[in-house]
Amino acid sequence: MTETTDPDFQTLALLEKQAGRTAVVKLLGNHRQNVTQTIAELEKITGNIDRDHIHMIAHRMQGSCGSLGFHRLSALFSDMDKAVMDGNHEQVIKYIQEVVHENEILADGVRQYYPEILSKPESSG
Amino acid sequence: MSILIVDDDPTIRDLTSLLLSQAGFTEIATADSGAKALQILGIDPPAPSEFIPDVILMDIMMPGIDGIETCARIKREETFADIPVLMVTTLNDVEHLKKAFIAGATDYMNKPIRAEELLARVKSAHRLKQEAKRRKQREVELERMSLENPVAPSRKQGMVSPRTGLPGEAILLGTLGVALARARSSGAVTLLSLDAAESFSTRYGEEKLGEVMSDIATLLCHQPARLGDLLLQTGPAQFALYLPQGDVEQAETQANALRAAIAALQIPHEYSPVGPALTASAAVLSFANTPLSPADFLAAAYGLIERAQSSGGNQILVQRD
């Protein structure tokens, strides 16, 4: 059973108590794959910003990251969503970089608490 | 209970399915888009339904057909018209929610998903479905009764409360039916429900609850009212006020006064989680231009009062339109 005081992993630890580790590992593994693919897609963005597309991605990721308890990542996607809706493209690029950085920190946590998920490098598929 | 989860986000689908299956829900289907949901239900393309859910959880923002349009298309089908659709969204803006309710959504909950809230809302939506079904049957029965015998005795269940002599739920349904059939209906309904009535009945007995309801009915009858306002008893511990032409602000003010009057009676209630004396919660709803049927409107009102009571009681919740 995962014992942690890391606020990012409290929700999953609670879920693990209810549903068991196997279910949580599967859920988190799929989520990590989803996040990795999404971030790879965002990293390709340099100049032209497709407002609706980024809005859709940021909105979706805000909900799913938040639902698993990854509140910092969720908040960054929320800020990115607001920036893209405000037409502030510079800020959008800045938030993409912050998301990449925050995701690396989160990956460290996943390695620590759920090593079976990240036993091989995350791939963008 | 069977549930259809419609969300473009695989994490939300996985998490919601996991939480619901952990809570004992075994029949769960998922759709990654509005189009897929319509296909599963056999709406588009038209086909026999693969799955008939008891409750639908629907994301609002999805690529292609969004959740609001999907909800509207589902609700247009007679087979699915009574299935509660619970909107799940990160969006907080009132306009989206308003559109969702116009499209026929029953309730909403915000992402991030929280297990306790999810389960409470799903169970509540299912209860509402059962309630709506029961009320619809009663509506049909009422219509049949009035056709067969226009002066049928009003002692039939739901017509008049035997204890207080107040008109009952069936009268409210009939009255709402007439009002909502008008092109431009306006008015409000207030439900006033005693908090922790079941535990009151357990502690002091049903007879005592009946006495208390009778006392409160007398009290309510002496409150200032406009000509045309109607006081009813819609449950063993519940009153309703039908306020034709009334708006929710007036209704809210009045409901506050009625709650204060009940609290002032200082009727002891040892088992109440709210306080040492009996309290009441209220739900105020406008029926101005509502697209709902009388039964669905009343089911929404019951949902609102249940929410007021399950979130602590001794409060008023208002649904403006």
Image: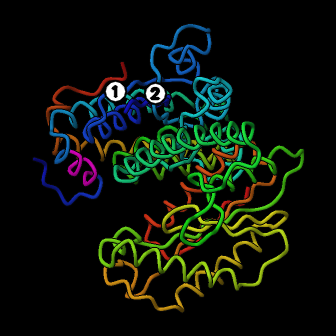
Do residues under tags 1 and 2 come within 8 Å of each other at their CB atoms? yes
Return the x and y of residue A7 as percentages of the image width and height. 28, 58
**What kind of residue is marked 2?**
Pro
Q: Nearer the viewer, residue B305 or B40?
A: B305
Rendered view: B293 above or below B29: below
Tell me what residue is drawn at x 58 percent, y 61 percent. Answer: B234
What residue does disc 2 label? Answer: B53
Return the x and y of residue B295 as percentages of the image width and height. 64, 45
Rendered view: B264 above or below A72: below
Return the x and y of residue A116 as percentages of the image width and height. 14, 32
**What kind of residue is marked 1?**
Glu
Q: Nearer the viewer, residue B100 or B283?
A: B283
Q: Which mark is residue B27?
A: 1
Task: Identify the secondary structure beneath mark 2.
Answer: loop
Q: Which mark is residue A39?
A: none
Left or right: where A93 falls relative to A49: left
Task: Identify the secondary structure beneath mark 1.
Answer: strand
Question: Label 1: how many residues lie within 10 Å, few (<14), some (14-19) or many (20+)?
Answer: some
Left or right: where B150 falls relative to A72: right
Tell me what residue is drawn at x 47 percent, y 79 percent. Answer: B211
Residue span colored magenta: A9-15
Tell me what residue is drawn at x 37 percent, y 83 percent. Answer: B269
